[in-house]
Amino acid sequence: MAIYGYLQCRMLLSFRLFLRSVLVVLTLLLALPVLTVLFSWLQWNAVSNNILLEMAYTVLPDYIGTSLLLCVLVSVGVVSIGTATAVAVTLFEFPMRRSLEWALLLPLAMPAYVVAYAYTDYLQFSGPLQTTIREAFSLDGRVFPEVRNVWGAACIFSLALYPYVYLLARTALSERATQLMEAARLLGAPMSRRILRVALPMARPAIAAGTALALMETLADFGVSSYFGIQTFTAGIYKAWLVMENRIAAAQLATLLLVVIVVLLAAEKRAQSRLRFYSARVDRLSGEAQPFQLRGLSAAFVLTLCVLPVLCGFVLPVLFMFRALLQGDGLVSLPWDRFTQWSLTSLSLGGMTALLAVGAALLLAAQARLHPNWLTRQVMGVVSLGYAVPGAVIVVGLLLPVGWLQDTWPQTGVGFWLTATVLGLLWAYLVRFVAVAFQSVQSGYARVPASLDDSARMLGTSGFSLIYRVHWPLLKKPLAAATLLVLIDVMKELPATLVLRPFNTDTLAVMAYQLARDERLGEAALPSLALVMVGLLPVILLSRTLRRN
């Protein structure tokens, strides 16, 4: 019996040592790109100094001004659309409300660059809309202004990203807003006062959190800004690296972008922490309060208000893409053989990343569950930061040390292994998307009672056996959801894939971007629609979860 207890202790210590070693390695792998970008300021030299000074006098003001203007416009757009639709479906009863509750999530399936391709093809000077109007009214010249500008990009981002605000605001309002609105009505408050003074103050933290998420996606975007030719920070990073061929200047520009992202992430976390004051359930009053019934013109107005974002953010872009897909010689002339190869490449990269990310997330969540300590909390912070880091920053953070090592020890072949194979691409994906898997696995662990662990230990089960025999059967659904989410995010990822992919490793996202950039929008419609169909899967899962709740 003593020998058995001794062996159990040794196995438990070995398991703890293994988990800590994995945590240290995982922390280094995920933090290295960000640390490299920050340490780039230590590599200050005359060349990078001159380039930064030249950029400060020429293009840097444009980068800052354009990025700020874009963020302001996107903030106004996502707050207006997301808040108005959340208030409508939560507080009012009108025709099609149940269907619109989940339909308003559909733009989440549309990558912003796909929406940009669709509207540009339809609204440009040679597009079908302007051509039809010119022929019908015998007009010459442009009918509508050019859509490829900051204002057009802000509209695209607002239509694609408003579900972040809608989802969080709807969750915040659905708990207590109806009851408190009813109480305010009994006290004589008119409808406008009930909405402005009761409902919206409850949703303020949720609106702030959703807006911060939308702005992080906006600043991290490369597809829309590059396709529209607007000078944002992300475009400037790629230009400094690829055009000016100065990696230090690119890294220092990436640092400025990273500082803005960290500020937005801190604001989002602060807003999320305040949500707990508004999410606690209250006892139901006798005669449970119901959404206010709308009729006539009021119902028609609210219905139109909710239908327009779905129509402009999902239905019309899909129809425009189908029109581009079917024009000309139709489906026969499309590159189906190459499309199959692009799809297989996207699926293989997504599958490998998903398995690695879910495995790392499971080990991290198990460590946080079994042995919470200072090291675990730090690793969780690093992992959570990864998804907020733009792809351009990760690319610079990975290629910078590779360049240093290749210049110092060219015989090691580090550059070959990280740029001519998929290793560098998988590394970049893991930095971004381990956080997605970790959030899903951690939410699954939250539903597993801690008493099960105590019971298993009393029966002699611990270490790997505890994870395999107790946790694994209870975490199959969260692990499957995490695998699906990472797979889809990898397939839609553009900036990191565009730079780090090896030769002959084209994905659906890369080919959609390149074909659209070459004005071959009919061919770009095929991979774009494939990405939309894939993106529908998590939206369907999310809508089912919300309906069950």
Image: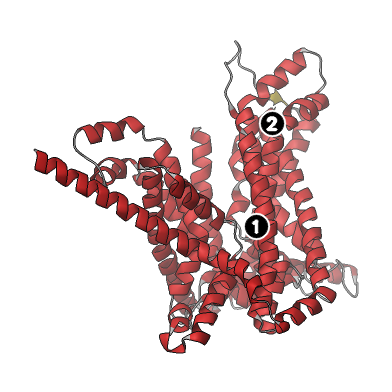
Q: Where is residue 423 in the image (x, y as percent from the top left)?
A: 43, 73
Quarter of the image for the N terminus: give it: top left
Q: How crowded is mark 2: few (under 14 residues within 10 Å), some or many (20 or more)?
A: many
Residue under the image location 21 percent in, 40 percent down: 461
In the shown orientation, is residue 381 left or right of residue 461? right
**Which disc, if any, is residue 94?**
2
**Residue bearing the label numbered 1:** 217
Distance from label 1 to label 2 (Cα)? 32 Å
Q: Position of residue 477 (x, y in %)?
A: 37, 45
Q: Which of 13 and 322 is in front in this view?
A: 13
Type of amino acid at the residue the image marks with label 2: Phe
In the shown orientation, is residue 549 left or right of residue 296? left
Determine whether 197 is above or below 529 in the image: above
Determine whether 272 is above or below 537 in the image: above
Q: Where is residue 20 in the image (x, y as percent from the top left)?
A: 36, 53
In the shown orientation, is residue 105 left or right of residue 479? right
Q: Which of 453 and 473 is in front in this view?
A: 453
